[in-house]
Image: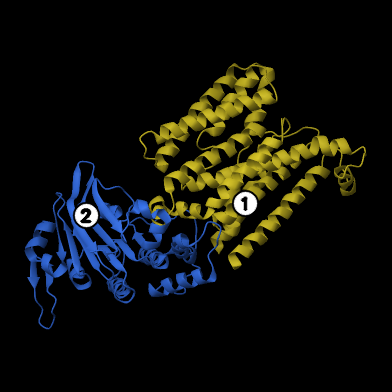
Amino acid sequence: MSDAILSVRDLTVSIGPHQVCAGLDLDLAPGGRLAILGRNGAGKSTLLATLAGLRDADAGEIRLAGQTYAAHGLQAAARLRGWLGQERGDPFASTVLETVMTGRHPHLGRWSWESGADAEIARAALAATGLAGMETREVQTLSGGERQRAAIATLLAQQPRLYLLDEPLAHLDLNHQIATLDLLARRARDEQVALALVLHEPNFALRFCDQALLLFGDGTHVAGPAREVIDAATLSRLYGHPLRRVDAPGHDQPVFVPE
Amino acid sequence: MPARRRALLVLALLAVLGAASLAVALMAGSIALPPGEVFAALLGADTPARPIVLELRLPRALAGFACGGLLALAGALMQVLLRNPLADPYVLGISGGAGVGALLAMLLGLAGIGVAGLSFVGALAAMLLVFGLAHGDGSWTQTRLLLTGVVVAAGCGAVVALILTVAPEQKIHGMLFWLMGDLSQVAGIAAPLAALAAALAIALPFARELNLLARGAEQALALGVAVPTLRRLVYFVAALATAAAVTTAGSIGFVGLIVPHLVRLAIGNDQRLLLPAAALAGGSLLVLADTLARTVVAPVQLPVGVLTALIGVPVFLYLLSRSAKR
């Protein structure tokens, strides 16, 4: 697929002796939504960081909007893809607005300061994540969930075309989990951005994503349309715990519950 | 844009503070001079005050300003590099290496440029040793860098203690003054002033990238910052700034740790403003402290490092309690 935002060919990733995936092929088109599922330690974060160009793959090719990361350069790549890591830590005090404004960095020249337009983009991102009115709060005083949403707002302010999110729902309550996934799905539909999300809830993967990548932790993987690859047997093997499929009347989407 | 205008305003105010501190340093001393005489001497009039102003006070004040600025700038950079608010220019052993060099020179009977030269060699040796060891396997974590620096600093401290033990009595006084920081033996002012200008000129273009680095290396990399290159640059700029300062005036404590925090508490943590503001504030603080050091119990001169702490601690505690209430 030549118009894919992210295309991966024959990718092999490992952490020391532990293989995360081998021979992985993947295409993520504008508006595409990929869920990455797997057990703790299966290498989901490592794979996502590799897809983001933050660490080198062992073999294979990753193209972002048709070019490799090396060909893009760091700043041009940062205008195209955003990455949400798991780590939240600010050793120095900073306001919420300043934090979110850091997402504008790749769009600014070396000597330019954030303009009023940049501030507007940051404020809109805060409003989208339900943090309107918190602009002047110290980021160190936020709760874990608010901090997570501020990090997502930073990513929105970056305005990339590819969002790579490592556990975007961490620390969020149920209400904000759904709101965040709704927000991201809306961006994918309305602005044709592509999403890749590391998730721990297969039902969310089914509800919000059209593709799924299951990492089994032994170097094998299954990738394909979410509705085809997510079934009770595969999930039971994936998590090492039996899951049962439940079809609720009136819902076209099945639900998987642990036994 | 308001943020930029505010930054320029803050820097203009601090520049006025710096000029005022220099003016005080030129007027105050064992012979107090009125502003008119200082001006006349600066403008070239051949008055009796001329040698006092131009040959004694001006070089010392300018050297003090440069050293204070260098230390505060190096401290701010180290705090970002190590992502640790407790970091200061000396945490990575650069002043320790300089101390070993300077004390060895004094032990050998050298003075002035000899002490400065050997202390610079010591600082460079410590800088390269820490960099080489911390960089060993290519991964360059803050913890590894910090631990390497702390251990090298401790080793240098032991060597300094050893030299102090075996040194003849009449040399101990000069050695202690060097270790506490002393501006009375300044060998040249061109080098520290040039070092301050160069360090600012190299660091400022990367100030916004430093903002991102302070928030985390991976996040900075994802936003387009060339993290490994930037870290190396910051390390060497901070290390060379520290080396230039301690070579000029000994290991003056406190300025490099507290001034960046002082400035941060007052104006926030944007490195684009913080770095130049810390340099101006550090320079002003050191000039004022040195002026006090040579006047409060004149004709006896106190080590300036004692005064920087005595001025800085109450100011810092006041700002800290004020920001806690906010």
Which SS class for mark 1?
helix
Q: Quadrant of the N terminus of chain A?
A: bottom left
Instruction: Look at the picture and state if B91 lies above or below B103.
Output: below
* Neighbours of disc 1 within 10 Å: few (<14), some (14-19), many (20+): many
Is residue A59 toward the left or the right of residue B325 in the image? left
The image quadrant of residue A52 is: bottom left
Q: Colour of chain A?
A: blue
Nearest the camera: B28 or A33?
Answer: A33
Q: Which residue is mark 2?
A: A9
Q: Which residue is mark 1?
A: B276
Q: Position of residue A165 (x, y in %)?
A: 30, 62
Instruction: Look at the picture and state if B252 lies above or below A218.
Output: above
Q: Which residue shows up at 56% across the image and 44% down it?
A: B75
The image quadrant of residue B166 is: top right
**Residue A199 seen in this snapshot:** no
* Pointer 2 chain: A
Q: Position of residue A183 (x, y in %)?
A: 32, 74
Nearest the camera: B226 or A4?
Answer: A4
Is residue A243 toward the left or the right of residue B40 in the image? left
Which SS class for mark 2?
strand
* Pointer 1 chain: B
What is the residue that sits farthest to the front in this orientation?
A2
Q: Nearer the viewer, mark 1 or mark 2?
A: 2
Three-letter residue code for mark 1:
Pro
* Neighbours of disc 2 within 10 Å: few (<14), some (14-19), many (20+): some
